[in-house]
Amino acid sequence: MSRSRTIVTAAGVLWLTHVAVLIGLGNRPPGPFLSDVIQLALGGLLIAALVHAAARSEGMARAFWHLAMVAYVLWMIAQGLSVVNDLHRTTTIPWITNLIFCFWFVPLGMALLLDPEHEAGRVDSLIALDFAQGVLVCVAAYVYFFYLPKSETPGELAHGVWAPYFAGYGLVSGAFVLRGIIARSRDVRWLFGSMGTFLAVSGCADALYYYGPGRGLPTGQWFDLLWSALLVVPIVIATAWKQAEPPELSLEPPVREKRIYTELFYMVYPMAVLLMSLRIAREHMALAALVVAPSFICSSARLLITQNRLIRTQDALRREASHDSLTGLWNHKAILEILERELLRAERDHQPVGVIMTDVDHFKAINDNRGHAAGDVVLRIIASGIAAMVRPYDSVGRYGGEEFLILAPGCGLGETWELAERVRAHIASCSIMAGGSHVKVSLSLGVATGASAADMEKVLHTSDTAMYAAKRAGRNRVEPTLGHATGAGQSKFSSHERDFWI
């Protein structure tokens, strides 16, 4: 807060100094030179205020202030050239400075393209394309406002393009105000509302310079105080900025900003390029095509990137809806849908479907003794081990908790039992190291088969009953035994012990 007060105080002192210079010297030397120097110093204070605001911000707000810094750095360059021109008069510098002064706000206008829900303060491919559109706006504006029309005064806007210029400026400031109105975020409302209002006032000041009492006034006249005040206002806005505290935790889901409105802002720059190119085409068709073609390419690339991200998001949501987040296996709903589909196919093909219900032995003790984090890792290792032992066309899902369901299409009771025994022996051979000691894991498995969709509930009940029979018979075994000797150390499937460290 002390730094903010220092910046605001210094800005106030400079503005009062400017008043004294204009009263004492006016447009007599070195009045115009001192007036430009004071405005340059105010621009430096504004950059410092924006840097301080960005340092106190995060996410979208930081990106917003960075864009504002870029805009006012351009303004500082133009003002610095004005100071140089006061010392060494040339015909080129006024033309360049007027061009920059007319379009310094374009980088700030790119803040309209920031997304408060996803922006992390960094630039991605979409922001790069939006920046390219902003550059194309400057190119089209240069051709439209300076290259084609003939100005009565070198370096000034021609009278015939004053109205389109202010219409474009009003479009940007109006979009800022609209963004502030429709936003649900307090920070977004404050940023865009305050800066949108400032841009509107700044546009009115420009209109007074071209149409009103400021027309024709040289540097050093009273109108310079208005320009200086338009530097003090954003200094106050930047120093008064305070990002909202994180919202309190709520059981209600957050209300998202209406995306249809925010998407409309991405059309502002391409539409501006198109409208200016229509006027350029009346004078020079090839030049208009050189402006429109890159804008069309950027818009198309943005559409393709957005579509690709949408497809990837849909794929991720589809996988999240059907897969267990911890183990990566099919979740409860998905594995039951697969079972129903396999039973329907079995009914058509007259082939059985093997079902294996699996439960991790003594898993509660692992959670109690090693912690839930270790328990989660054990579940992931077991899930990976089960998936490694089944055929590519078999399906494995997490049925619930520490229970897994294995589906083996085309397997009768004997083949299903053998698959279950391979899985049991493989997991029993795993030795997991947790907290400096070994954790032995084993499975109790129940097998059953079904041949039609009508058998679904029955086959699940039968396999579940068999699994609990395995637990009662001593665990680490497959039930029903089908005449085979099962259990630890009795499997006909040889396996090597595997170590896992967690």
Image (spheres, rainbow, N blue to C red):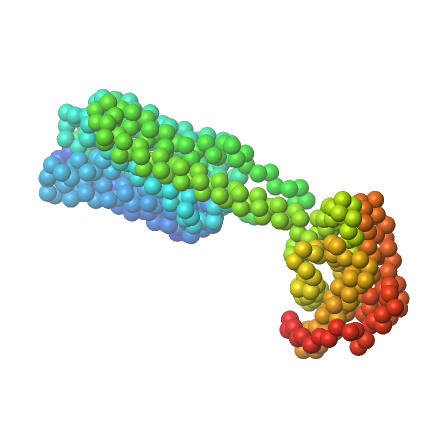
Give the answer, above or below, for where 225 lies relative to 412. above
Viewer-proximal residue among 259 and 156: 259
Q: Position of residue 88 (x, y in %)?
A: 10, 43
Residue drawn at x 25%, y 41% is: 39
Horizontal side of 294 relative to 32 (left or right) equals: right
Q: Does the rendering let one see residue 244?
A: no
Viewer-proximal residue among 404 and 42: 404
Viewer-proximal residue among 112 and 446: 446
Horizontal side of 491 relative to 206 (left or right) equals: right
Occupied quadrant, residue 300: top left
Residue drawn at x 52%, y 39% is: 186
Horizontal side of 454 relative to 253 (left or right) equals: right
Q: Position of residue 4 (x, y in %)?
A: 40, 48
Q: Position of residue 157 (x, y in %)?
A: 21, 28
Give the answer, above or below, for where 347 lies relative to 171. below
Q: Does the rendering let one see residue 93?
A: yes
Occupied quadrant, residue 141: top left
Horizontal side of 387 relative to 132 (left or right) equals: right
Residue drawn at x 29%, y 28% is: 277
Give the answer, above or below, for where 324 lies relative to 112. below
Q: Position of residue 261 (x, y in %)?
A: 50, 32
Residue drawn at x 68%, y 60% is: 391
